[in-house]
Amino acid sequence: MNAMEVPVVYPTEEEFADPIDYLNQPALRRLGKVYGMVRIVPPAGFNPPLALDKARFKFKVRWQNLNELQLLNRARLFFINNLNTFNRLKGHPAHLEHTYVRVATARLHLYDLYIHIMQRKGLLPTKSVLVDKPLWRSFLSRNKLSHTVSPEQLVQVFTSYLQDYYSYLYKMYRKTGSGSIYNAMLYKEAIPHSALQTNDLDSQDDQDHQDNQDNQDDRNEQGEETLRTQEPTPDEPVHHMARMSAAVGADDSELQDWCPICKHIPKDNELDDVSYCDSCSQIFHNRCIKNNNYLNNASGEWICNNCIIGNGFYGFKYSTHYFTLKEFEQKYGTDESPDVDKLEKEFWDLVGNQDVKTTVPYGADIHSEDPAELTGFPTNDKTYSTHPMNLLNLPQASSSLLPFLNRNISGMTIPWIYVGSKFSTFCWHLEDQYTLSANYQHEGSPKVWYSIPDNSCDNFHKLLHDLTPDLFEKQPDLLHQLVSLISPYDPLFKKYNVKWYKAVQHPNEYIVTFPRCYHAGFNTGYNINEAVNFTSESWLPYGLEAISDYQLTKKMPVFDMYELMVNILVMYYRDNLPSPVSDAFLQHCHHELLSYINKETRNILSVMPFIAQERLLHVSNQLHLDSEDTKEYIQEDDEDGFFCASCSTMCSFVFVLQCKLDRSRHAKRRKTTNNDNHLLKVREFKKHLEEDSDSQVLCLTHFLECKDKSETINSLISLREFNELHHILKLSGNKMDGIK
């Protein structure tokens, strides 16, 4: 398949020994800006042996249903599930087995028609929709159906399949007021579940393991493991709609025990006045159901809105069986060289084929606590154990900013391992906080990569949002969930002017992605890869951009950008920077930190009239001007920070704890929890928060936007003394200016 490939670079031994400085060179940065990624071939002689014990290294796999990963396919499947659930509630006998209906010789997807109406009309009385002839004509023209389907036939499809559901949404929308219909009607799940499940993957997993034990050499005539595919039969629908525990380890026993509408656990004397959703089994107070205008059917069956409207969540099912590397290679490996072009076409055909489900295993995001299994690179060989391109070392290499974090983050500063099989895939995503990433292939079949560089990201966002707008309303951080594919060969890429490139990675090669580069791809067979993140000075603007982008999608950041800059300035002032940085970079950090602290200082003045008390939390891994050696502060990832309940941003230095209890109950709680101590420890405070469903953390900006802030009990919680922050800025600034 024709595609422009990313550049291949061949660093010298000297350049390879200082990789971050090499990648930060203007020529390499220009390549990263244009292509989003590069493929690196190491100097001759660099070929580290795989250090993992294949007989002992164990991992679970995630089962990937390829056609459900295609974003439009999944949206159509979700919608039919919603329609069937609604029809069940209304007592309608029809059960839709496909995402489409046939009109003459055409397939007409009901989701596509629904989205077209919602985009053009929104939610209105059905009479105004039915008489809108341009609405029907535009849909037929847009989908190239004008010569096979008449507007009258299209109206008949709407009245037969969609009108009741559309009317229900309209009535609910009128009752909830304004804003997004989905935000108003859906509740937040502590453990989200997906509506899609087409078979019992646990049973298949166990059967696969048994088959492997019985016959490890079971291959098809091409010498490859036969893929698990299911094609439609006359007696069996293509898609069975059932509730799926998609999160890792989630099952029905892990349902939240509190009512998701009021966020309170039903008391013993309320258990006779609760209802359980007959679709997902979630518990609700009857009063909450009544107040929120939920429907019951004639037989008394009741189904919650998350099952009728759909939460848009999708996740992978994980195996119950632990594979060893040896076992997985025997089952999914092959000695033949794959035809990459042929496999690429077959892969995208399977992803796009809604009628054939192909399930493949992928050992992804594997992280072990055993020091001997943290990396596939040798750890006892002097040649490779200390080399900066050993991915265990790269995040801490010279010129990286991650050492300033003073914490280890699994998957970012500590590598994750990936064990692929034929057609296992990694979906479109950006790296956390737009950092750079390095991926090394230890052995096996090639891995095919696709990149969308920074300058096409906005167009790519628009393409996907226009394609499935409801999914992005329900799951604003959908593109951060690594569950969505669309082929770069799709004509929509050209229509939306999305530039993309391709790379084919072989053993002993690296793929490096640059900041804000979308990437996706698939494995052409069994292979072992390893990946980690790193940063450089040129990354800083992207890291700051990620803060505002994450607030829009309500994605939690992995680390605190502003705490990182505080650490840099503290180490600079104390002359103990772990690696040299430029004066321009230091000035950039100082400027951004000063702007942020000044903004928060102004916000504090605005929130003080609503504050009942002020508190200071003791954070153990902070750097201070009077701190000594930094190593004593390096900790594992056990103090994750505090996140705003409204926008999910990390509250760097201060936040408001908002309690919605009345004042008498709040006073009683303060007395019983010893809340009068001014200085609190983070772990104790977090434990208290987990047990307190009446309180929430808010950043100062979103607290000021609260309409009920005068009616709640509010505490201002500081993570650092602001006087100290201003002192850090003053002393580091004076040093930059040459003032003693």
Image: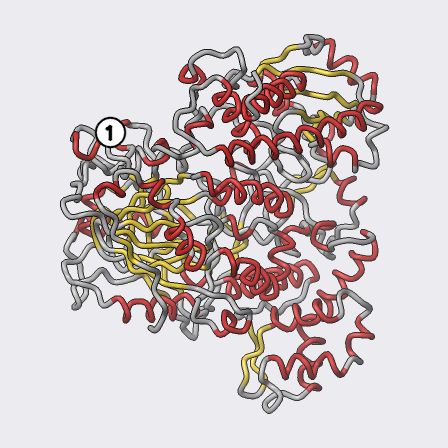
The residue sitting at 56% across, 17% down in the picture is: 619
Can you tell which quarter of the image residue 66 is in? bottom left
Q: Position of residue 665 (x, y in %)?
A: 79, 18
Quadrant position of the N terminus in the picture: bottom left
Which amino acid type is shown beneath numbered disc 1? Answer: Ala
Answer with left or right where residue 711 lies relative to residue 446.
Answer: right
Q: Position of residue 191 (x, y in %)?
A: 55, 40
Front-most of residues 43 and 451: 43
Quadrant position of the C terminus in the picture: top right
Mark 1 lies on residue: 372
The residue sitting at 53% across, 69% down in the picture is: 497
- Residue 694 lies, with reference to residue 218, above or below; the image says above
The residue sitting at 69% across, 50% down in the picture is: 302
Q: Does residue 450 appear in the picture of this structure?
A: yes
Q: Position of residue 505 (x, y in %)?
A: 28, 56
Q: Does residue 243 appear in the picture of this structure?
A: no
Can you tell which quarter of the image residue 382 is in? top left
Sort mark 1 into few (<14), some (14-19) or many (20+) by Cα contacts within 10 Å. Answer: some
Front-most of residues 554 and 526: 554
Q: Residue furthest bottom?
A: 147
The residue sitting at 52% across, 59% down in the picture is: 455
Answer with left or right where residue 660 lies relative to residue 396.
Answer: right
Answer with left or right where residue 601 lies relative to residue 443.
Answer: right
